[in-house]
Amino acid sequence: MIAGIGVDLCEISRIARAVESEHFRQRVFTPEEIAYSEGKGKRRAESYASSFAAREAFVKASGESLGAVMFGGGFWLVRDSEGKPAVRLSGALGEKWKGAKVFVSVSHEGGYACAMIVIEKINEVIIHDS
């Protein structure tokens, strides 16, 4: 059962300015996200913006507070060896969404990055009135 869908569009130049601050990077992104984005060289802002947009999209899909997702340290975007993104949850978010599947798609073009999140709850009991 689909528990939520969220999408976000993020201006890359806004995130490029924000990540100039070490404090901002450390507060919002995980060490893995920072390492991945910094490894992208001139395209690092696109990676940061994609991760930021994924957080915003998760907030919209899940109904969680922005602070819990953005600053709680329990949400991060990872990529496999092929570059395919996936969401990892830990801490309070991981417990609350245990057993759910979180699907993510990210893209960037021109000056924008976007992300879409679909949350599927597994083992959800659906009761139909007869």
Image (tube, grey):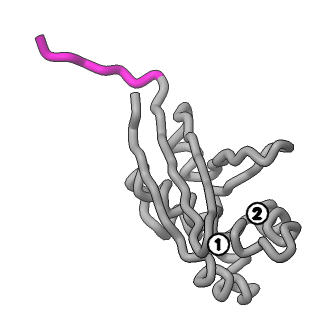
Residue at x 41%, y 46% (from the top left corner): 5
Q: What is the crowding at mark 2: few (fewer than 14 residues within 10 Å), some, or many (at least 20)?
A: some
Q: Quadrant of residue 124?
A: top left
Q: Quadrant of residue 34?
A: bottom right
Residue at x 86%, y 73% (from the top left corner): 41
Q: What is the crowding at mark 1: few (fewer than 14 residues within 10 Å), some, or many (at least 20)?
A: many
Residue at x 67%, y 56% (from the top left corner): 76
Q: Position of residue 69 (x, y in %)?
A: 53, 62
Element type where label 2 sits in the image: helix
Quadrant containing the N terminus is top left
Seen from the viewer's position, the closer of residues 85 and 124 is 85
**29 displayed left or right of 10:** right
For the residue marked with disc 2, what is the amino acid? Glu
Bounds of the magenta span? Answer: 123-130
Verify CB contact (< 8 Å) between mark 1 and mark 2: no
Residue at x 69%, y 69% (from the top left corner): 46
In the image, residue 25 above or below residue 106? below
**39 displayed left or right of 56:** right
Please tell me whether mark 1 or mark 2 is closer to you in this view. 2
Counting labels gives 2
Element type where label 1 sits in the image: helix
For the residue marked with disc 1, what is the amino acid? Val
Q: Quadrant of residue 25?
A: bottom right
Seen from the viewer's position, the closer of residues 49 and 66 is 49
Q: Earlier in the sequence, mark 1 or mark 2?
A: 1
Magenta-drawn stretch contains 126: yes
Q: Position of residue 4 (x, y in %)?
A: 39, 43
Residue holding disc 2: 33
Residue holding disc 1: 28
In the image, residue 89 above or below residue 99? below
